[in-house]
Image (cartoon, grey):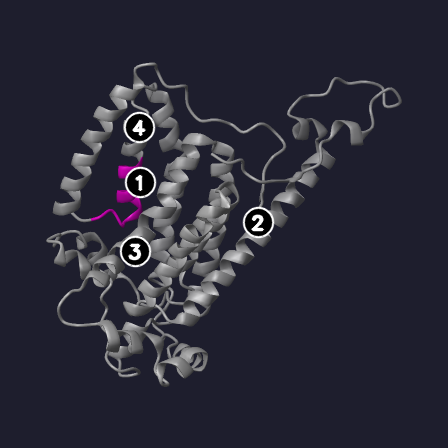
């Protein structure tokens, strides 16, 4: 989808790399990779926002190790407010139930209505686990665990790449991501809904296993899910509607789709589909949760695009010099150029291919 940007040249972040930056980058990224794997096996994968931020910041420092430290401190300055907001979002989501019994039967009825013809009247989660879930771990369980984990780093990693390449696009990305998070959080408070595994535990469905992290154990990575499992235990199970897991996956793909060659589109679009299968199979979400999450992504782009256009038009009317990026010299009204000549129109800008 098109992204509305300010009518000014893109702001590149940081100073150019030094001529010997390539060798230094290889060494620094190797050190980062070894440290990341060690922490991953001992502590767990970085699924907490603050923990993920530390590793992504360290990765940007390693990648641009030849740059001055002020460039790396600028990253922290821009990102710490984002991390704080995500932490507040995560904590606030736990208060969404407010002691009330979460909604559950509505999603069960809708899922049976949508796909019961293909599942023999079963909820898709129950049908998938009846056909695929076994006590022993299979290769698809490993893939499911990796796809599920990607939710916690994909949006962060994409944002970090944007920040390093073009800070104006990073800002546009964060505005949309922030709106999507806020819309999801508001819905959790207005309509607290429980996932399939909760319904299974409370007798509303045939027993549903929560199996989103079991695949790592098959690879010998018993500590990989420690952080995530702790977060799942502490979380309040009322954040099923909408599914922000799938919403984030679709959001990242749609944001970058215009800047990617069309032959790669099927590969990119397979990511939100893989996330959908992962969430439904592992008992984390219903199909209707996923569909509503996709609707939220579309509304996010629509609302934020319209808001940015309105903001650009308002700035152009109130402060012409702000729209051009230059302060106009005071001239008599009759001698000055017309507003149409001095104020560029705010247009949709499709990011160029990289």
State if disc 1 and disc 2 touch (CB < 8 Å): no
Task: Please give the name of the residue rendered at 42% of the width and 83% of the height, measured from the top-left corner.
Answer: 117
**According to the image, label 3 marks what residue?**
147
Seen from this angle, which residue lies furthest top? 19
Say which of 84 and 348 sits in front. Answer: 348
Q: Percent position (x, y) of residue 60?
A: 32, 31
- Pointer 1: residues within 10 angstroms few (<14), some, or many (20+)? many
Q: CA distance from mark 1 to mark 3?
A: 19 Å
- According to the image, label 1 marks what residue? 53
- Which is more N-terminal, label 2 or label 3? 3
Name the one closer to the observer, 52 or 38. Answer: 38
Type of secondary structure dominating the magenta stretch: helix
Mark 4–mark 1 CB contact (< 8 Å): no
Q: Which mark is residue 63?
A: 4
Q: CA–CA distance between discs 4 and 3? A: 25 Å
Q: Residue at x 37, y 85 (%)?
A: 121
Between tags 3 and 2, which lies in front? 3
- Rendered image quadrant of residue 112: bottom left
Q: Is residue 96 visible?
A: yes
C-alpha distance separating marks 4 and 2: 32 Å
Residue at mark 4 to residue at mark 1: CA–CA distance: 15 Å
Q: Are marks 4 and 3 in contact (CB under 8 Å)?
A: no
In-image side of 144 versus 194 (left or right): left
Q: Which mark is residue 304?
A: 2
Residue 173: x and y, percent? 48, 43
- Name the element at disc 1: helix
**Residues drawn in magenta:** 45-56
Disc with the residue nearer the chain's start (4 vs 3): 4
């Amino acid at each position: 989808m098109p992204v509305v940007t300010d009518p000014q040249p893109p702001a590149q972040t940081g100073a150019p790399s030094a001529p010997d930056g390539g060798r230094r980058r290889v060494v620094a990224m190797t050190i980062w990779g070894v440290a990341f794997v060690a922490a991953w096996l001992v502590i767990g994968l970085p699924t907490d926002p603050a923990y993920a931020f530390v590793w992504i910041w360290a990765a940007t420092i390693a990648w641009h190790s030849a740059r001055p430290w002020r460039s790396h401190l600028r990253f922290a300055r821009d990102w710490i407010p984002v991390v704080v907001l995500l932490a507040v979002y995560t904590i606030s989501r736990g208060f969404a139930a407010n002691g009330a019994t979460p909604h559950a039967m509505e999603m069960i009825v809708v899922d049976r209505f949508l796909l019961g013809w293909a599942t023999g009247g079963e909820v898709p989660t129950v049908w998938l686990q009846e056909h695929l879930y076994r006590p022993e771990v299979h290769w698809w369980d490993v893939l499911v665990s990796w796809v599920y984990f990607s939710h916690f780093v994909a949006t962060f990693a994409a944002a970090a790449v944007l920040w390093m390449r073009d800070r104006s696009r990073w800002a546009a990305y964060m505005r949309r991501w922030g709106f999507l998070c806020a819309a999801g959080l508001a819905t959790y408070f207005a309509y607290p809904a429980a996932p399939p595994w909760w319904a299974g535990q409370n007798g509303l469905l045939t027993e549903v296993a929560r199996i989103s992290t079991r695949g790592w154990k098959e690879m010998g990575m018993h500590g990989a899910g420690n952080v995530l499992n702790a977060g799942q235990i502490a979380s309040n199970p009322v954040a099923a509607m909408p599914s922000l897991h799938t919403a984030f996956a679709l959001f990242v793909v749609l944001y970058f789709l215009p800047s990617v060659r069309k032959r790669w589109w099927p590969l990119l679009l397979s990511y939100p589909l893989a996330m959908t299968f992962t969430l439904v199979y592992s008992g984390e979400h219903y199909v209707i949760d996923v569909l509503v999450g996709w609707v939220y992504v579309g509304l996010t782009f629509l609302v934020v695009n319209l808001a940015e256009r309105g903001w650009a038009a308002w700035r152009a009317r109130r402060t012409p010099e702000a729209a051009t990026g230059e302060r106009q010299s005071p001239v008599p009204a009759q001698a000055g150029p017309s507003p149409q000549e001095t104020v560029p129109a705010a247009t949709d800008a499709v990011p160029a291919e990289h």
